[in-house]
Image: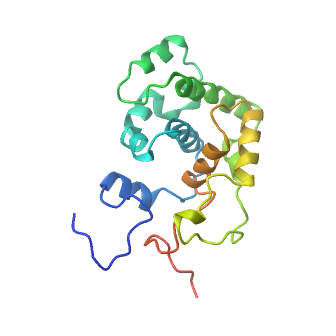
Amino acid sequence: MDVDPHRTPRCFGDGDPLYERYHDEEWGVPVHDEHALYERLALEGFQSGLAWITVLRKRESFRAAFAGFDPVVVADYDEHDVERLLGDAGIIRHRGKIEATISNAHALVALHEAGRTLDEVLWSFAPPVGARVRPTTWRDVPSVTDGSKAMAKELRRLGFRFVGPTTAYAAMQACGLVDDHLASCPVVRPAAA
């Protein structure tokens, strides 16, 4: 791939087309679809302790393994499915993360049965627009915020698992509740005058 030497580097992902596409088209972009929110929450849980590119490269396998992240289907998974998934080399084979993804499908179905949505829950923790200063370096990007702590607490109260404050903040970034692209990043568009 030819790179324009005058182009400012991305925040992350330069040099890997899959990572570049994720950076340019998804990270920090608002998501409101229930399946997409459930998927991102699940994948952020699987990412815990690993590099994001590892999860990204396995994303299609995760989608196949978890029925396109349809919570109604995944909520019906049982111990046989857990064993099947533990044998699936296409995904990250971690029993706790697999069981949490299934448990989170149960929690999401219960949330829907109560007349609520994951969209409503997650977006209630989005900081007000303009409340944050765009980061200039990675040192300026938090891994945990008061909002992510509150989100994690609420998700756990609702029965979700594997959603600590750091995972919650990563989900906030992945779902566009916050936009942590660095100020110098080429995807940051100047505000209209």
Viewer-side residue, 106 vs 174 = 174
Residue, x 38% and y 22% (percent of image)? 88
Q: Position of residue 132 (x, y in %)?
A: 68, 69
- The quadrant in which the C terminus is found is bottom right
Give the side of residue 60 with respect to residue 67, left or right.
left
Viewer-side residue, 20 vs 165 = 165
Give the side of residue 154 with respect to residue 184, left or right.
right
Residue, x 59% and y 23% (percent of image)? 75
Give the side of residue 190 with respect to residue 88, left or right.
right
- The quadrant in which the N terminus is found is bottom left
Residue, x 65% and y 72% (percent of image)? 133
In this figure, what is the number of numbered marks?
0
Among the 4 quarters of the image, the one containing residue 76: top right
Considering every residue shown, the one lying at the far bottom of the view is 193
Q: Can residue 116 be spotted in the picture?
A: no
Considering every residue shown, the one lying at the far front of the view is 139
Viewer-side residue, 113 vs 193 = 193
Q: Can residue 43 be spotted in the picture?
A: yes
Q: Position of residue 139 (x, y in %)?
A: 56, 63
Considering every residue shown, the one lying at the far left of the view is 2
Above or below 164: residue 183: below
Above or below 159: residue 123: below
Residue, x 54% and y 18% (percent of image)? 77
Colouring method of the image: rainbow
Q: Position of residue 85 (x, y in %)?
A: 44, 21
Q: Position of residue 83 (x, y in %)?
A: 46, 14
